[in-house]
Each structure stands twice: as structure tokens, then as C-alpha cells.
Amino acid sequence: MQSLNKSIFIKFILVGILNTLFGYSAFALLIYLKLHYVFAVLFATILGILFNFKTTGRFVFKNKDNRVIFRFIGVYAATYLLNIGALSIFDMVKFNMYIAGLLLLIPMALISFIFQSKYVFYKEFRRCH
């Protein structure tokens, strides 16, 4: 891996940890406040999109173009639907929603990264390879 790729990968991991902590904290707080998981994920996702767009765009991909936010939102809409589908399966078997949300963090993060690098920040990502 080239030094630039290593740097971007390390930044992605660090920013991803920050974004994950922010998003899961929002989700857990909303579940604690007795919001249904569908709305907890929705509101945590909206807050996360705004926070993540700036952190991922600026710190990882060095992108300051706010016009790509619509593609970014599209990625999060797809991720949201996948997350809700998975949570509904956990809900059907009466699984703990805190743990379910935690278990879904890694697969949702991977899906989000793949979509972001292919559809949102693809120019910047290509430049790094």
C-alpha cells in the first residue's frame, strides 16, 4: 500500500470510529428515550449524515464540495433501509435493540465505505490508488 493510501486508510479508520461513536450514541440515546427503533435509526442517521459528510469528506477524502451531499445522502438512504431490514429481523426474534444496533455497526460501516468510495468520493478515492 502506498504511503498516501496508508494515510487515507488510517484517517478513514479514525474518522469512522468517531462517526460510529457519534451515530451509535445518538441511536442509543433515542432508544433510551423510548423512541421506536425505526425513528431512532432515522434521526440518528440524519444527524450522522450531516456529521459524517463533513468529517469523511474533509478529513478522509479532502473533499469540500458540498454538491456531493446528495449522493452521500443516497448512500445513507440505502444503508438506512438495509439497517432497518436487519433490525426488523432482530425485533421479530425479540433480540435486544442495543446489542442489535451494535452488531450491525461493522457490516453497515463496510457497506457505507464501499458505496461512498464508488459513488460519492470516487474521484478522490481513485486519485488515492
Image (tube, grey):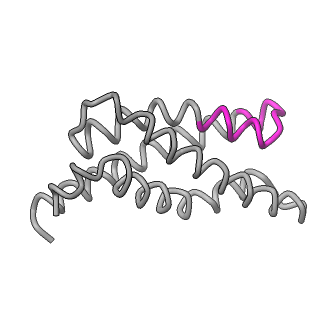
Q: Residue at x 27, y 30 (%)?
A: 65
The foreground one among 52 and 95 is: 52
Q: Residue at x 26, y 45 (%)?
A: 60
The foreground one among 69 and 49 is: 69
Q: Residue at x 68, y 37 (%)?
A: 42
Image-quadrant location for residue 61: top left
- Quadrant assignment for the N terminus: bottom left
Residue 100 part of the magenta segment: no
The foreground one among 28 and 75 is: 75
Query: Mostly what secondary structure, the magenta segment?
Result: helix
Against 105, residue 61 (above or below) is: above
In the visual, does 114 lie left or right of 61?
A: right
Magenta segment boundaries in residue numbering: 30-45
Residue 110 image point, x, y percent? 47, 62
Q: How many marks?
A: 0
**Residue furthest to the left:** 3
- Quadrant assignment for the C terminus: bottom left
In the visual, does 115 lie left or right of 82?
A: left
In the visual, does 22 lie left or right of 30?
A: left
